[in-house]
Image: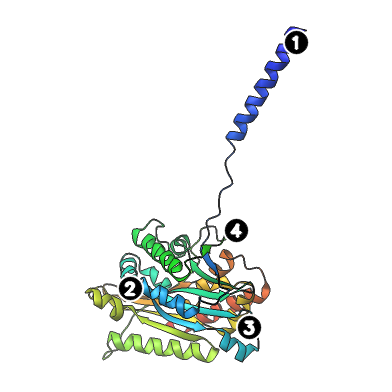
């Protein structure tokens, strides 16, 4: 009987040890890496405003190229708003943008960067920006690139300066892009007429581009001549004939999206870049697909998805018709 007892006790100890070891080796649930980040702070006293946020970004070296109150046009056009405050803003670090575009011209698709600012029903002010991971994936820049990491750190500094009591929200999105960059890119051969200059070429192209967009309700809230405003200032004059970016927006797109997904403003307005290198005979253009919006913030409602894809197709058709 004593031998049976010892045998049972031995078996029990072995099973317990095995269970403990098994539990110890079970990997912890991995945290999902997000492409956007939402910084939030209580604002019951109303001290945090879109203007104070702009000033905080400016103070750390992120120049705010535009800080647009979307509620005014929403109320005028749609007779409705969803938030007490809803702004779309554009911001840039010229130094870091120069460093990144010099290595990766496709960073023009994030020049300038964008953010949405909104105050929710609970009285919290929120700012949505792209994370370093989101910027890296979408532009195919290494996530550990030191200038990209520095950009991310500067954004975080700006957010904490703007809202000292704030914190990053825990997000439950499961991105469905599978690591794909989701870009829309174009190239066209540059051929000059006998008496035309490169300046004539790009002026004519952009005049036609703007002329096709505006009648369809697209707005161009920002235009950046990267060559003149950034490259020339750095003495970087012999690589490109031109490098320009546009910020493109459409009320009929952002209004329905903002109802359920105000944070999608981290992708809006859309930045469209076009450039030509002196040693190439082609112009390169591109922007980040609206599939980035859909796959990173888990957009599933038809009311948001249809306007996004419809607007993108219109832009693609315009560009293709010009370069054909």
User: What is the CA distance from the residue labelled 3 to the residue labelled 2?
Assistant: 34 Å
Residue most toward the front? 45
Q: Nearer the viewer, mark 4 or mark 3?
A: 3
Answer with mark 2 or mark 1, whichever residue precedes in sequence: 1
Circle 2 sits on which residue?
A: 94
- Image location of residue 323, percent across then percent down: 43, 82
Q: Nearer the viewer, mark 2 or mark 1?
A: 1
Circle 1 sits on which residue?
A: 4
Q: Which mark is residue 174?
A: 4
> Is residue 272 something one can see in this rendering?
no
- Asked whether the residues under the numbered discs 4 and 3 touch, taking CB atoms below 8 Å apart as contact, a structural biologist would say no
Q: Residue at x 49, y 83 (%)?
A: 68
Q: Residues within 10 Å of mark 4 (few under 14, many from 20)?
A: few
The correct choice, above or below, for 278 with respect to 219 in the image is above
Secondary structure under tag 3 reads: loop
Secondary structure under tag 2 reads: helix
- Image location of residue 278, percent across then percent down: 26, 75
User: What is the CA distance from the residue labelled 4 to the residue labelled 1?
Assistant: 53 Å
- Image location of residue 176, percent across then percent down: 58, 60
- Image location of residue 252, percent across then percent down: 60, 84
Secondary structure under tag 4 reads: loop
Circle 3 sits on which residue?
A: 81
Q: Nearer the viewer, mark 3 or mark 2?
A: 3
Q: Specify whether 255 is left or right of 227.
A: right
User: What is the CA distance from the residue labelled 2 to the residue labelled 1?
Assistant: 79 Å
- Asked whether the residues under the numbered discs 4 and 2 touch, taking CB atoms below 8 Å apart as contact, a structural biologist would say no
């Amino acid at each position: 009987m004593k031998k049976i007892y010892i045998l049972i006790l031995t078996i029990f100890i072995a099973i317990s040890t095995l269970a403990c070891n098994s539990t110890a080796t079970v990997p912890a649930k991995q945290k999902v890496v997000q492409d956007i980040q939402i910084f939030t702070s209580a604002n019951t006293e109303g001290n945090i405003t879109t203007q104070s946020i702009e000033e905080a970004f400016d103070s750390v070296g992120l120049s705010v190229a535009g800080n647009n109150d979307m509620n005014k046009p929403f109320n005028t056009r749609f007779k409705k708003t969803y938030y007490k405050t809803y702004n779309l803003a554009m911001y840039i670090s010229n130094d870091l943008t120069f460093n990144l575009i010099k290595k990766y011209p496709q960073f023009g698709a994030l020049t300038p960067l964008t953010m949405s600012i909104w105050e929710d029903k609970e009285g919290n002010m929120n700012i949505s920006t792209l994370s370093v991971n989101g910027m890296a994936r979408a532009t195919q820049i290494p996530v550990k690139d030191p200038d990209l990491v520095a950009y991310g750190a500067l954004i975080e500094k700006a957010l904490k300066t703007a809202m000292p009591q704030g914190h990053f929200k825990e997000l439950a999105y499961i991105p469905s892009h599978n690591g794909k960059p989701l870009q829309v890119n174009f190239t066209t051969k540059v051929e000059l007429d006998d008496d035309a200059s490169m300046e004539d070429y790009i002026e004519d192209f952009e005049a036609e581009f703007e002329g096709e967009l505006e009648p369809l309700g697209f707005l161009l809230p920002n235009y950046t001549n990267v060559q003149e405003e950034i490259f020339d200032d750095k003495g970087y004059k012999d690589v490109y004939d031109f490098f320009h970016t546009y910020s493109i927006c459409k009320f009929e797109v952002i209004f329905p999206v903002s109802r359920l997904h105000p944070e999608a403003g981290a992708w809006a307005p859309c930045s469209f870049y076009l450039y030509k290198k002196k040693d190439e005979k082609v112009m390169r253009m591109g922007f980040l697909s609206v599939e980035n919006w859909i796959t990173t913030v888990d957009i599933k409602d038809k009311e948001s998805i249809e306007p996004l894809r419809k607007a993108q197709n219109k832009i693609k058709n315009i560009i293709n018709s010009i370069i054909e």
